[in-house]
Structures are given as structure tokens and as C-alpha cells.
Image: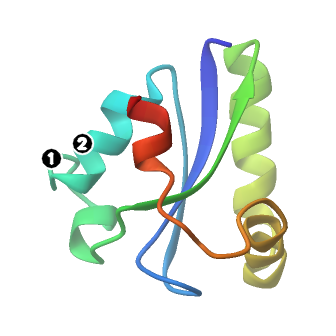
């Protein structure tokens, strides 16, 4: 899969960030190290709690937009369904 939609959190039930990328490892690394200026650096949002592959950039962007328009509760439900412990999934993607 070439494109990814991902959700970062500041902690369990914390501030959420939804993004899209074609290089998940690189992009999450940028967030974790504070290299991505803006929202995630300002609010220390760097725990990867959800990611999903997409075959096309159009599909990934549409999914990102859909999730961004969801209520906070729905976003949290998505994370809990896929990652009940809010475990940081970064180590899983760099192996």
C-alpha cells in the first residue's frame, strides 16, 4: 500500500491529530521529533495510535477528510476499536 491515514494522540484520550502521508515511518518520525511545525509540535501530539493503508492518494485523502469531520467521540471509538490500550504503534511500523 502506498498511502496511509493515521491518527496521533498526546496520550490516552488526549488531543488527536489526523493526517495522510505516502511514507508513514518518515512522517510519524517528523511528528515525534518535533520536526513538523504546527499543531502536533504545539500540543505535543506524537503517539501513533491508528493507521490504515490505502491504494490511492485520492482514497487516503477522502478518508482523512471523513475522519476529520467526525465528532471527537467517533474518532476515539475508532482508536479504541483498533487499539484498545492506546499503545504507541510506532515501533510496529519501524521493524
Looking at the image, the residue that sits furthest to the front is 95
The residue to which callout 2 is attached is 30
Residue at 77% in and 63% down: 69
Residue 60's label in the rendered image is none
Q: Nearer the viewer, residue 95 or 1?
A: 95
Where residue 35 is drawn, which disc sits there? 1
- Give SS at disc 2: helix
Q: Mark 2 touching mark 1, by CB under 8 A?
A: yes
Hey, which quadrant is residue 62 in on the image? top right
9 vs 36: above or below? below
* Quadrant holding the N terminus: top right
Residue 60 located left or right of residue 34: right
| Residue 45 picture location, percent across and down | 36, 69
Return the x and y of residue 70 as percentages of the image width and height: 81, 68
Could you tell me which residue is drawn at 72 percent across and 67 percent down? 79
Residue 49 at x, y percent in the picture: 57, 61
Measured along the vertical axis of the image, is residue 22 above or below residue 7?
Answer: above
Q: Quick check: 43 left or right of 86? A: left
Spatial CA span between label 2 and label 1: 5 Å
Amino acid at each position: 500500500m502506498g498511502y496511509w491515514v493515521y491518527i496521533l494522540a498526546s496520550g490516552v484520550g488526549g488531543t488527536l491529530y489526523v493526517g495522510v502521508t505516502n511514507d508513514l515511518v518518515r512522517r510519524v518520525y517528523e511528528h515525534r521529533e518535533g520536526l513538523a511545525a504546527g499543531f502536533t509540535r504545539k500540543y505535543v501530539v506524537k503517539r501513533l495510535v491508528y493507521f490504515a493503508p490505502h491504494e490511492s492518494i485520492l482514497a487516503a485523502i477522502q478518508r482523512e477528510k471523513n475522519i476529520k469531520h467526525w465528532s471527537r467521540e467517533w474518532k476515539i471509538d475508532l482508536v479504541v476499536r483498533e487499539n484498545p490500550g492506546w499503545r504507541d504503534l510506532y515501533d510496529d511500523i519501524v521493524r
